[in-house]
Image: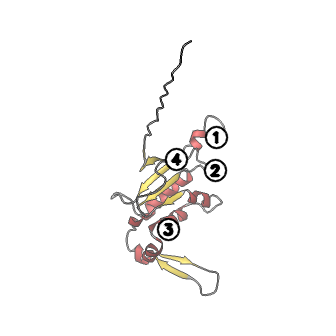
């Protein structure tokens, strides 16, 4: 589809998606990260183009309940290097969960799913993670777990007292 023909302003508008990790039907970490990466890149939109940033916002709540299958909590390692010889530090997923929380694990998983180019940081900045259920973006949410939430329009009534002369 050509991006210059037709009204594409609505397609480029960014919607806010909510994903709750505290629900029982939440997929494991890898599958969840790939779904979030698709939304952040905008691949679910008909105007998707690899060189444009047309993705949406994602609010992930309940990140303390993120889980991985198998023995990844004990065996998966996260590395940190300070560029000094012998300064390579490693931390397993359990330690990362205790130290930084599930939000950091989710961010790192989504970061690995995004393409390694100039758009990676702005896309990752649109991912908002929260350990609990409270977040400041409740007014922005349009899509809640994939279903569109209808906002009722505010109706303002004005009573005018006009005097006839």
Q: Residues within 10 Å of mark 3 (few under 14, many from 20)?
A: some
- Between discs 3 and 4, the one toward the N terminus: 4
**Residue 152, percent across and down?**
43, 37
Frontmost residue, 59 versus 54: 59
The residue wearing badge 3 is: 104
Are discs 4 and 1 less than 8 Å apart at CB?
A: no
Mark 4 element type: loop
The residue tagged with tag 3: helix, strand or loop? helix
Secondary element type, mark 2: loop
Closer to the N terminus: mark 4 or mark 2? Answer: 4
Badge 3 or badge 1: first in the primary sequence: 1
In the figure, residue 40 lies in which quadrant? bottom right
- Label 2 – label 3 distance at C-alpha: 26 Å
- Between the C-alphas of marks 1 and 2, the distance is 11 Å
Residue for point 51% across, 59% down: 128
Q: Does residue 71 show up?
A: yes
Q: At 45% from the left edge and 58% from the top edge, which residue is drawn?
A: 60
The answer to whether any part of residue 35 appears in the image is no
The residue positioned 40% from the left and 63% from the top of the image is 28
| Residue furthest out toward the bottom | 86
Decide: is 143 above or below 36.
above
Q: Which residue position is annotated with label 2?
A: 52
The answer to whether the residue labelled 1 contacts the one labelled 2, judged by CB atoms less than 8 Å apart, is yes
* Residue 82 occupies quadrant: bottom right
- Residue 2 at x, y = what percent? 64, 39
Give the spatial CA distance, label 3 vs label 4: 23 Å
Label 1 sits on residue: 3
User: Which residue carries the number 4 mark?
Assistant: 15
SS for callout 1: loop
């Amino acid at each position: 589809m050509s991006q210059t023909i037709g009204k594409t302003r609505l397609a480029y508008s960014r919607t806010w998606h909510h994903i709750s990790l505290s629900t029982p039907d939440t997929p494991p970490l890898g599958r969840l990260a790939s779904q979030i990466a698709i939304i952040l890149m905008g691949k679910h939109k008909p105007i998707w183009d690899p060189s444009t940033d047309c993705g949406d916002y994602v609010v992930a709540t309940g990140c303390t309940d993120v889980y991985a299958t198998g023995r990844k909590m004990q065996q998966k390692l996260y590395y940190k290097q300070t560029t000094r010889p012998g300064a390579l530090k490693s931390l397993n997923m359990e330690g990362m969960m205790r130290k930084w929380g599930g939000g950091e694990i989710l961010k790192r998983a989504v970061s690995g799913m995004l393409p390694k180019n100039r758009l990676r940081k702005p896309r990752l900045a649109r991912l908002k993670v929260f350990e609990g259920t409270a977040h400041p973006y409740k007014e922005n949410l349009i899509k809640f777990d994939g279903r569109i939430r209808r906002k009722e329009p505010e109706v303002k009534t004005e009573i005018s007292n006009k005097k006839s002369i």
